[in-house]
Image: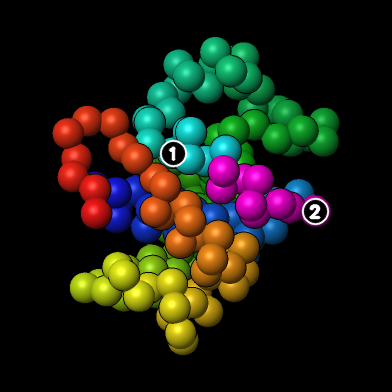
Amino acid sequence: TKLTVAQDFLIFCKLAHERGALPTPWDWKCFLEKALELVPYAFEKSDAQDKYGSENVFAAMTGGRSLRFTGEVVYGSGCCGEQGDDHSRIEKEVIRLFKGREADAFQGAAAGVFADVGGAALWKTFYTRLRLPGPFPYP
C-alpha cells in the first residue's frame, strides 16, 4: 500500500542519515522529488546491474562503495544477518507515527520524527504526491 511504501522509505532514510551513509551536503527536497519517480517500483538486482554495472565487492578498499555495501551500512547487517537495535527503534517509531492517523502524522509533536530527514512539510508533499502503479485507491 501507499502507506507501507512511505513508511519503509522513511525508515530507510532515517537509518541512512543516522548511520552517516549520506554525502554532505544533502538536499532532501531534491532527493524526495526524484524518489517519487523511483520508489513506486521494485529495484531488482538486474536493474542495479544495468544501471551500475557488475558489483565490485572490493570497491570499498579503493575508496568506492558497492550498492550491497551501502545497503549493509544503512541496514546495519549483511543480507542474512539480524538488523540492529536502531533499526527496530526507528521502525517502531515510524509505524506508531502513522497508526490510525495518516492525516495528522505530519503535524504537531509527531512532525519531530521528520526533523532529521528534511522536515514534515517535505514528507507530507512526498506522501501526498506518491502514486503506486496498479489499481490502488488514493485519498
What residue is pinned by disc 2? Answer: 24
Q: Give the image location of residue 105, x and y in percent.
A: 37, 73
Q: CA distance from mark 1 to mark 2?
A: 22 Å
What residue is pinned by disc 1? Answer: 39
Q: Residue at x 19, y 40 (%)?
A: 136
Residue 125 visible somewhere in the drawing:
yes
111 lies left or right of 64: left
Q: Earlier in the sequence, mark 1 or mark 2?
A: 2
Residue 15 visible somewhere in the drawing:
no
Give the residue type at disc 1.
Val
Give the residue type at disc 2.
Thr
Q: Residue at x 46, y 86 (%)?
A: 109
Question: Foreground residue, 117 or 30?
Answer: 30
Find numbered disc 1 in the image and state the secondary structure of the residue it sits on.
loop
On screen, residue 31 above or below 66: below
Residue 39 placement: quadrant: top left
In this picture, which residue range is highlighted in magenta? 24-33
Q: Give the image location of residue 55, x and y in percent.
A: 60, 21
Answer few, some or many: residues within 10 Å of disc 2's Cα (few below 14, many 20 plus, some between 14 and 19): few
Residue 54 placement: quadrant: top right
Q: Quadrant of the C terminus?
A: bottom left
125 lies left or right of 5: right
Q: Residue furthest front?
A: 139
On screen, residue 73 above or below 133: below
Find numbered disc 2 in the image and state the secondary structure of the residue it sits on.
loop
Label 1 or label 2, whichever lies nearer to me, is: 1
On screen, residue 92 above or below 118: below
Residue 135 placement: quadrant: top left
Q: Give the image location of residue 32, x and y in percent.
A: 56, 48
Q: Residue at x 52, y 79 (%)?
A: 112
